[in-house]
Structure formats: structure tokens, C-alpha cells
Image (spheres, rainbow, N blue to C red):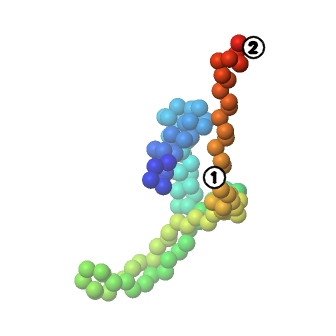
Amino acid sequence: MTGGSMTKAELVEEVSRVSELTKKHSEVIVDTVFKSIIDALHRGEKIELRGFGSFRLRKREPRKGRNPKTGDKVDVPPKKVPYFKPGKELKDLINRQAAEPPPAPSPAPPIPSPDSAAV
């Protein structure tokens, strides 16, 4: 990962590396997963991925807003927004990894001296 965030291209690269599939096949897999989640949310369904989390829609009620440029009041229509709730296992994994100190580098194996090779 670069810069603290992962792009879709980097995710495809990671799936390709781990699964030993081509990048094209990995891209189809990633796109299919995203499309399936979007389609299920569009149908009003909840997606639950055990150990990871769940996706659902939240309804926002209509409200009065303000145009920041002019200061005029505007009506904001009701809308649905996607919401992700991380699962307990995901939260535990993230917090455990953040709390653990990084592993110490393993010592390099001793290099045999030229004299010991002759023995």
C-alpha cells in the first residue's frame, strides 16, 4: 500500500498475487464482488460477511440545509446512504495488530570463516 490507502488497482494486484491468478481474472473477481454488494444494497438488502462486517442502507430524512456560497436556505431531499459496520473479529484483528510491537528482525545466520570450511 502507498500513502496509507489502497486503491482498487492495488486491491486487484493483491488478489492477483495471493491467488496466483492473472490481473484480468482478479479484476473480474473484485468488480463482481463490488457489483454484487451494490446490487444487493440497491434492492434494499443487508450484506453480512461473517468476521468482516455488514453493509446496509440508512435512510436520511428530508431537512433544511444552507447554501454555503449564498447563505440561502434550501430543501435537502430524503436519501439513502450506504453504511458499513465492522464485525467484532475485524475490530479485534485491527486493534490487536495496532497494540502489538513490530516483530524484531531475526539475527542473520553466522557466516562461516574460510578456515572452518577446510575442517
Q: Position of residue 114 (x, y in %)?
A: 65, 18
- Residue 93, compared with residue 117, is above or below; it is below
Q: Position of residue 18 (x, y in %)?
A: 60, 37
- Residue 57, compared with residue 31, is above or below; it is below
Badge 1: residue crowd in 10 Å (few <14, some 14–19, many ≥20)? few
- Residue 103, compared with residue 60, is above or below; it is above
Q: Residue at x 67, y 57 (%)?
A: 100
**Marker count (numbered):** 2
Quarter location, residue 62: bottom left
Q: Amino acid at mark 2?
A: Val
What secondary structure is found at the residue carrying circle 1? Answer: loop
Give the number of the disc on residue 6: none
On screen, residue 10 versus residue 107, left or right, reads: left
Is residue 97 visible in the rendered image? The answer is: no
Return the residue at label 2: 119
Q: Position of residue 58 (x, y in %)?
A: 55, 72
What secondary structure is found at the residue carrying circle 2? Answer: loop
Q: Position of residue 113 (x, y in %)?
A: 66, 22
Q: Residue at x 32, y 87 (%)?
A: 73
Return the residue at label 1: 102
Quarter location, residue 40: bottom right
Badge 2: residue crowd in 10 Å (few <14, some 14–19, many ≥20)? few
For the residue pair 70 and 62, the one nearer the viewer reads as 70
Q: Residue at x 65, y 47 (%)?
A: 104
Q: Amino acid at mark 1?
A: Pro
On screen, residue 47 versus residue 27, left or right, reads: right
